[in-house]
Image (tube, rainbow, N blue to C red):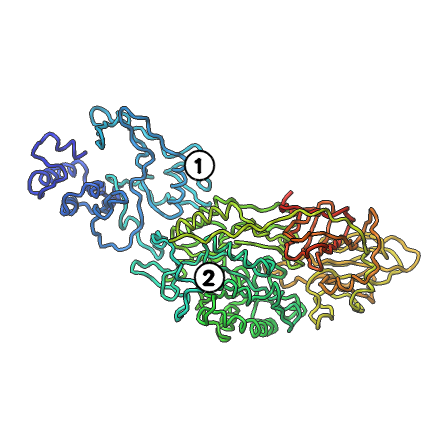
Amino acid sequence: MASHALFIADPSTIIRPKIPLAIAYAPLTLIYFVTLWEVLPHLDQYRRGGPIIAVQIENEYGSYYMDKKYMAYVKMALVSRGISELLMTADDGLNLRKGHLKNGMGISPILMMVYTTKSFDTWGYLRNFGDPQMLMKDVHEMFILGFSFNFYMFHGGTNFGFIGGAQSSNRYLPVVTSYDVPPPVPPYPAEGLHVDSWLDSAVVDGEEVFCKCLSWKRMMALFFLPLVLSGLAPLSEYRDDMLKLSAARFSWSHLTPLKLKDRSVGLSTDINAQGKAYFTLEGHKFMIVGGSIHYFRVPREYWKDRLLKLQACGFNTVTTYIPWNLHEQERGTFDFSEILDLEAYVSLAASLGLWVILRPGPYICAEVDLGGLPSWLLRYPESQLRTTSHEFLEAVDKYFDHLIPRILPLQYLHGGPVIAIQIENEYGSFGKDKDYMEYIKEAMLKRGIVELLLTSDDHEGIQIGSVKGALTTINMQSFVRESFIQLHQMQSDKPFMVMEYWTGWYDTWGKKHNVKSADEIRYTVSRFIKYGISFNMYMFHGGTNFGFINGALHYSEHLSVVTSYDYDAVLTEAGDYTEKYFKLRKLLASASVGSLPRLPHPTPKAVYAPVGIIFYLPLFDILPYLNKPVMLHTPVTMENLPINNNSGQPFGLVLYETSICGGGNLYASVHDSAQVFLNDTSIGHLDENTYDLTIPKIQDCQLLRILVENQGRINYSWKIQNERKGLDEDVTINGTLLKNFTIYSLDMKMSFFKRLRSAPWEVAPEHYVGPAFYWGILNAGSSPKDTFLDLSNWHYGFVFVNGRNLGRYQDIGPQRTLYLPGPWLHPGDNEIVVFEKKKKGFYVQSKNKPQLQY
């Protein structure tokens, strides 16, 4: 019954009084409630076996608000007449406080009492239509956030008779007879939300939202029309307010490495009066907006460009892994020079005003060979990687003894930009040793690490991968509310941090190029910002797997990661702007106080004249110019070769030779791929699934040659333990063991090409089949610029420019071009060497754009 209908006939009645309640309105209200409860017995309430679970006090009084005592009076009138269920009020966002009554229930869940699907119609105006897609998007988000909600209207019905009301703003507008509103089930459900029946089920991300077992004859009732308030659902360990809106805009101009000179408290956590946890930096509220850029995947000459673009997009932090396998390729010999100069990279970030989060491992995954662990660890079968195995920890300790002293002066409390350091990486997905993470944490602390420690895992691994004394962070592909619930349950007094929000994904040879829409990225990041969740975008700029550093996957088959680590990231492999970049920049600018830095100029690109192949050198002709080969009774894997200070060979290819005097069935176990020759003639191919081939009958003894390539060690899962490359078992013909092997290391380092220059290069024929080196000249003019080498008329191999290994190409795709940074070119002529394993191409072209998919 509407208040207008009850009191309009009595001129003495003041609707929603402006004067004290004692006149006419209050007594009539009491009469109304007494009459109503004669019609609606107490047994209809939930506690008396009925469906009524809540009762609303008045309606939208905040927009009227004439008497501060009125709402309390109506509440008392309801309670005194036996209302024992939840009481609530309903107002729009601007009037919540005016219409609100104290409830004494503390923190409460959220109920959207009037979610309007479409406005009503008035005579003389066009009909109002709702947006079904927007409706479904809103509903999906309310499900994800755990909001309860009520559709107004689910079914509108009709204003029969004279019951229609009216609006009066600039003019009097009576409501039409029809109170029709389209039902809140559009013909095309939003992605991720499947609607079979609104009362039966709703599914978000595969999980049922409604619990049918809690229904009363399949339906509960909310009496009257409510909005927000307390106690409708019981409070649990997890509270919906953990995702409170973050009202403040970013203001970090005073919180940069350049401005904060007096330092006493680094990155810490705190809780406000409402129980909301957040980060602080030097006592100031702080939100991490980070992006991953790996220094070892970006030419040193471009570090500044990429970091400035990160900053200009609105980010305040750069994160990077530290690859042990690149810094200590030979045991006891460390390399922190050129592209591996960690200290220079971190110092550069500080000079530009960026904070740094370091992820030193020892294991990092990162889609690099063996997950960043040095291959020489595989020389020791008794050593169990990523455990408290004595041999493994001894190597870790020696590495940390060298690495951490480099990090110490870069820490925040020592005047540097490093505000946090991660312990290991995603150990929850490995989790073989419960004491391992504690050991790594203590190894860092006792060497002087004083900044905030973190762990990083996906939702399945955060329990196992966490360690006491370190903040647990989470990795995710999209905004998943349940992951934050899980994280909150583990550490309710800590702020949320998404250590890896995946902006795209890496590619593997023979598979499709992975992409992720810019709108999806923007939407997810907007939700992080909305709820004050710190985050790091993996990757902001992916860069390139130069040389042989790529890793691999192995589920049903061995899949090598491609050379490009473009990752469909915010910046391209070559550092160019993308749609994602501009959408994120606009979003972060809208959330920031003040303007963002100006955009750095795009990096210029060039197309050069095709490189003709002038000379060639068959693989077997270079053997006298290599380092002295290893002579062994039986073959060993490349990790176990007695070279490089007994550290074995980390990357590249290995050539095994032995003499045979008869044909038959050859058996050899190779990893990952091998070409087999009799003298210089190819007779077949071996791989992890092909162990044998038939050697034809021969008249005289000949040289059996097996050329094995390491295509990248597995970087994820327990299988890293067995990732030895080369020939890993005895080689036999018809069951007879082959002996006396000569083994050549083809690591193809810069020194390798210096020796190659003295070899007898010959004029290249028009056609040639078999592994060979091909030589040509690229003229870059007076001002070299970035370009992309197109190897589409070649088959399988590697490209070297002025001795630098650009990486692998394959005709199976998806990648069709190799990125050539301009700073690696000299003005004028540049040496191009192609090592082709199968069949000669005709020329090498260049393009001004990459081709990362067919």
Q: Nearer the viewer, residue 403 or 341?
A: 341
- Upstream in sequence: badge 1 or badge 2: 1
The residue at 86%/62% (across/down) is 659
Q: Quadrant of the C terminus?
A: top right
Q: Is 336 drawn above or below residue 620 in the view shown? A: below
Q: Which residue is mark 2?
A: 353
Crowding near the residue tagged with mark 2, few <14, some 14–19, many ≥20 C-alpha atoms within 10 Å: many
Image coordinates for residue 740, horizontal then vertical, percent: 83, 67
Q: Secondary structure at mark 1?
A: loop
Q: Is residue 667 left or right of residue 256?
A: right
Image coordinates for residue 543, horizontal then vertical, percent: 59, 55
Q: Is 546 drawn above or below residue 227 in the view shown? A: below
Q: Secondary structure at mark 2?
A: loop
What's the distance in space between the residues labelled 1 and 2, CA to CA?
Answer: 45 Å
Give the amino acid at mark 1.
Answer: Pro
Q: Which residue is mark 1?
A: 189
Q: Residue furthest front?
A: 782
Q: Nearer the viewer, residue 280 or 101?
A: 280
The residue at 79%/61% (across/down) is 757
Q: Residue furthest right?
A: 699
Q: Is 502 drawn above or below residue 422 in the view shown? A: above
